[in-house]
């Protein structure tokens, strides 16, 4: 998969349709690729976290609403931070309620930012530094992966596995 | 009425909605997000809001008509209503929701719901 002009991929999670449409538009306007889902469960499904922790898709940032039925944004945050494959993905939490104890809890739980709703373009602009910070880590990871699957080494490393 | 006259009228109505405190800067954010890729963005979001509000108000009415009144459910609906109205910049609706929630907390919801109904019929 060529990565010549890859946009950052953001996974947006919000149970309200209006807010989902809004965050999606805000992110697209800021040139991010967006996947929007309506629950924490669907978010985990999308990531492939429920499927033996294997990362199915590349997600660079997760932005989630706090108040959601079933799994809250905080619950989702913790699940992500506790997983080996996804703990490095930056997570941002949004909430319409300005409750300091909630904000602190989320930040201490590993959230990079906490946005008060309604979210605006100025908030979305704050995401870029968190994504840029990770880019170097990803580049290093990708280089390591490339070495493993490069043709000359394939036979030696993967003799028991089927290689295309 | 010619096109220019209509546009003028629409601009005046829009301005008055801001002046009277019905809309706030969040609505302007929506307008700024509208572009060639999504030329009907504002219309889509506002339509969603009206559909959502109608559903929420119906649920609120049902909850108010049941005995005993489930105040936690009421508060939940109002939380949703407040959330979506603030997302589109419906300033007055948002503040009415906030006051209503206070009444809910005090267990006195009934008296206040009728003041919210006129909002969904405003174009």
Image (spheres, coloured by chain):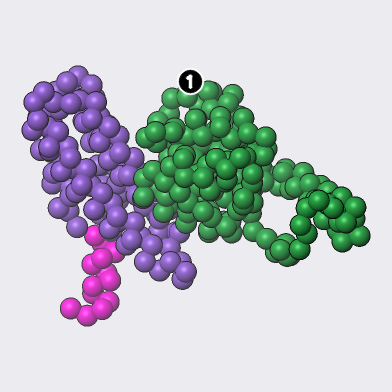
Chain colours: A green, B purple
Q: Main secondary structure of the magenta part?
A: helix
Task: Tell whether B92 sits left or right of A156.
Answer: left
Image spot of residue B103 (x, y percent): 19, 24
Q: Residues within 10 Å of mark 1 (few under 14, many from 20)?
A: few
Question: What quarter of the picture does the C terminus of chain B occupy?
Answer: bottom left
Residue B21 versus residue B79 in the image, above or below:
below
Residue B3 magenta-drawn? yes
Residue A149 versus residue A90 in the image, above or below:
below
Image spot of residue B60 (x, y percent): 17, 37
Which residue: 19% across, 49% down? B54
Image spot of residue B48 (x, y percent): 29, 55
Magenta region = B1-13
Pick the residue in front: B35 or B2.
B35
Pick the residue in front: A141 or B35.
A141
Task: Tell whether A107 sits left or right of B19.
Answer: right
Indicate the quadrant where residue B56 lies. top left
Element class at badge 1: helix
Which residue: 28% across, 51% down? B49
Residue B73 magenta-drawn? no
What residue is pinned by disc 1? Answer: A101
Q: Is residue B119 in view?
A: yes
Q: Is residue A143 in view?
A: no
Residue B64 versus residue B123 in the image, above or below:
above
Question: What quarter of the picture does the N terminus of chain B occupy?
Answer: bottom left
Task: Tell whether B18 sits left or right of A32.
Answer: left
Pick the residue in front: A61 or A124.
A61
Which residue: 26% across, 62% down? B12
Instruction: Work out which residue is located at the far front of the displayed protein and give it.
Output: A160
Q: Chain of mark 1?
A: A
Question: How many numbered discs, if any?
Answer: 1
């Amino acid at each position: 998969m060529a990565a010549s002009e890859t946009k950052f991929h953001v996974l947006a999670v919000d149970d309200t349709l209006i807010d989902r449409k809004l965050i999606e538009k805000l992110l697209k306007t800021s040139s991010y690729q967006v996947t929007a889902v309506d629950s924490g469960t669907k978010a985990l499904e999308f990531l492939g976290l429920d499927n033996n922790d294997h990362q199915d898709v590349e997600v660079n940032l997760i932005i989630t609403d706090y108040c959601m039925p079933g799994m809250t944004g905080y619950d989702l945050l913790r699940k992500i931070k506790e997983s080996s494959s996804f703990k490095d993905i930056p997570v941002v939490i949004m909430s319409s309620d300005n409750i300091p104890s909630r904000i602190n809890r989320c930040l201490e739980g590993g959230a990079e930012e906490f946005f008060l709703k309604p979210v605006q373009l100025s908030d979305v602009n704050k995401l870029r530094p968190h994504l840029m910070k990770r880019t170097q880590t990803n580049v290093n990871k990708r280089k390591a992966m490339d070495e493993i699957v490069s043709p000359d080494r394939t036979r030696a490393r993967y003799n028991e596995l089927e290689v295309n | 009425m010619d096109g220019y006259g209509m546009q003028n009228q629409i601009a005046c109505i829009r301005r008055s909605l801001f002046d009277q405190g019905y809309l706030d800067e969040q609505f302007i954010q929506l307008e700024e997000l509208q572009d060639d890729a999504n030329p009907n963005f504002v219309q889509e979001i506002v339509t969603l809001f009206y559909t959502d509000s109608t559903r929420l108000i119906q649920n609120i009415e049902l909850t108010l008509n049941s005995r005993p009144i489930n105040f936690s459910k009421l508060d939940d609906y109002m939380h949703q209503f407040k959330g979506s109205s603030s997302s589109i910049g419906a300033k007055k609706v948002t503040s009415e929701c906030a006051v209503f929630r206070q009444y809910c907390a005090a267990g006195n919801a009934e008296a206040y719901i009728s003041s919210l109904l006129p909002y969904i019929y405003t174009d």
